[in-house]
Image (cartoon, grey):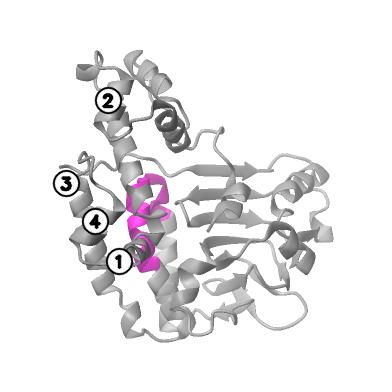
C-alpha cells in the first residue's frame, strides 16, 4: 500500500514586529515568560521585535527564535510552576547567547544546551537561534551524564558539533516543504546525533543502524496492514518477537506505535473524504472501514490532527475550496506544545 505523507507539520507563529517596544515586550512576555523570567536590554526599550516560528512533531518541538537582547533566567519558582522536563538545544545562527555572569558564550555556529529542569541565568545579544526541544525521557537514556548539560556549550570547531549543526540547519531549511511523517522519520537519527555530540564520541548503541532498520521494517508492515482490524501494538510486538516495551521504545519519536497507526488511518480517511468517487459513502462508514468504531472519538481525533471536523473537510473539498493547512490558528501555540512534551 502506498504511504500517504500529505499531513502538514503543525506550525505556530508569534510576531511582535511593528508593535511599540513596550507592547512588543509585553506580548513576548506573555509567551516566553511562561518558562523564563525575562528582562529586556535598555537599547530595545522602543522596539522589541520578536518572531518565533515553531513546528510540532508530536513529542519533539523545533523552533526558530529571532529575539532582541535580553536576560532570561529559569528560577526554581519557574521550574516548580511549569514542571517542564526538557532539553533545549540552540544553534546560534546570528548574535550570541550564554551564561549571564560567567562561563560559556555561544556565537555563530556554536550550540548551547539548556536543561529546563535546572536553574539557569542567561543572556543573549540581538540574535537568531534554531532550537530543538526534546523531552528528557527521549534523550537522557542515551547520555553518559544526563544531568550535566545545563548551559553546556558545544564549540563549532568540534567535528561532531559541526555535523550536528549542519544537520539542524539543513532541517530548518527543509521544514516548510516537509510533511509531518517525513520530519518525524528524521527524529530518531537526530536524537542519536545529539547524544553523540553531547557524549563526545559515537558509542556503538548510538549508531542506531539496527534500531532504525527494525523501525523501518515495522513501519512497512503497518502501512501494508493498516486496514487490518487486528493491527495493534500487541500483535505487532508478537509478530516481530519483541516485548511491548521495546516496541514502544522504537516508536517514542512517533508518540507510540498506537499513535502512529492512528495518524496513518486518519490520513487515509482524509484522503477518502476529499475523493469525489467516494462522495456517496457516509463518513461513519469510511471511519469504520479504517478501524474507528466509535464516531465521536474518531471525530475528536480527526479534528485534533487536522484542525477541522470530518464534515468540514468533506464540505470544503466538494465545494472546490483548498483545504486549509494544519497550522490553522485554532491549534495550540508553541508554549502549550512545550508543556505537552512527554
Residue shown at 18% from the left, 45% from the top: 225
Q: Is residue 146 left or right of residue 117?
A: left
Distance of mark 4 from mark 2, alpha carbons? 24 Å
Distance of mark 3 from mark 1, alpha carbons? 21 Å
Distance of mark 1 from mark 4, alpha carbons? 10 Å
Distance of mark 2 from mark 3, alpha carbons? 18 Å
Q: Nearer the viewer, mark 4 or mark 2?
A: 4
Q: Which residues are magenta?
A: 173-190
Q: Earlier in the sequence, mark 1 or mark 4?
A: 4
Q: Nearest the camera: 222 or 135?
A: 222
Query: Which quadrant would the N terminus be assigned to in this image?
Result: top left
Please name the residue that numbered disc 1 is placed on. Answer: 243
Are circles 2 and 1 on residues that touch, CB within 8 Å? no
Q: Earlier in the sequence, mark 4 or mark 2?
A: 4
Please name the residue that numbered disc 3 is placed on. Answer: 224
Q: Is residue 9 left or right of residue 262?
A: right
Q: Nearer the viewer, mark 2 or mark 1?
A: 1
Residue shown at 34% from the left, 16% from the top: 320
Q: Nearest the camera: 78 or 14?
A: 78
Q: Residues within 10 Å of mark 3 (few under 14, many from 20)?
A: few
Counting labels gives: 4
Residue 236, label in figure: 4
- Confirm whether residue 14 shows in the render: yes
Q: Earlier in the sequence, mark 2 or mark 1?
A: 1
Amino acid at each position: 500500500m502506498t504511504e500517504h505523507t500529505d499531513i502538514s507539520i503543525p506550525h505556530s507563529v508569534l510576531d511582535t514586529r511593528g508593535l511599540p517596544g513596550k507592547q512588543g515586550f509585553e506580548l513576548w512576555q506573555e509567551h516566553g515568560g511562561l518558562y523564563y523570567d525575562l528582562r529586556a536590554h535598555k537599547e530595545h526599550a522602543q522596539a522589541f521585535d520578536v518572531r518565533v516560528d515553531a513546528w510540532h512533531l508530536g513529542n519533539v518541538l523545533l523552533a526558530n527564535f529571532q529575539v532582541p537582547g535580553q536576560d532570561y533566567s529559569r528560577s526554581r519558582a519557574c521550574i516548580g510552576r511549569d514542571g517542564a522536563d526538557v532539553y533545549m538545544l540552540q544553534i546560534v545562527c546570528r548574535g550570541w547567547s550564554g551564561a549571564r555572569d560567567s562561563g560559556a558564550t555561544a556565537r555563530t555556529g556554536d550550540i548551547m544546551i539548556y536543561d529546563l529542569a535546572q536553574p539557569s541565568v542567561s543572556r543573549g545579544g540581538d540574535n537568531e537561534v534554531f532550537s530543538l526541544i526534546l523531552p528528557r525521557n527521549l534523550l537522557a537514556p542515551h547520555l553518559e551524564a544526563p544531568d550535566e548539560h545545563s548551559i553546556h556549550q558545544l564549540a563549532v570547531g568540534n567535528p561532531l558539533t559541526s555535523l550536528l549543526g549542519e544537520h539542524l540547519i539543513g532541517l530548518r531549511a527543509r521544514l516548510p516543504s516537509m510533511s509531518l511523517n517525513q520530519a518525524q522519520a528524521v527524529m530518531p537519527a537526530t536524537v542519536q546525533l545529539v547524544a553523540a555530540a553531547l557524549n563526545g564520541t559515537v558509542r556503538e548503541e548510538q549508531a542506531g543502524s539496527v534500531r532504525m532498520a527494525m523501525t523501518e521494517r515495522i513501519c512497512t508492515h503497518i502501512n501494508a496492514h493498516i486496514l487490518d482490524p487486528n493491527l495493534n501494538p500487541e500483535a505487532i510486538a508478537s509478530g516481530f518477537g519483541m516485548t511491548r516495551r521495546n516496541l514502544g521504545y522504537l516508536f517514542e519519536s512517533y508518540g507510540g506505535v498506537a499513535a502512529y497507526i492512528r495518524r496513518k488511518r486518519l490520513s487515509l480517511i482524509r484522503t477518502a473524504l476529499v475523493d469525489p468517487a467516494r462522495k456517496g459513502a457516509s463518513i461513519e462508514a469510511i471511519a469504520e472501514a479504517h478501524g474507528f468504531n466509535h464516531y465521536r472519538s474518531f471525530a475528536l481525533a480527526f479534528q485534533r490532527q487536522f484542525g477541522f471536523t470530518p464534515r468540514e473537510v468533506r464540505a470544503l473539498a466538494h465545494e472546490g475550496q483548498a483545504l486549509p493547512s494544519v497550522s490553522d490558528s485554532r491549534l495550540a501555540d508553541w508554549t502549550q506544545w512545550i508543556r505537552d512534551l512527554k
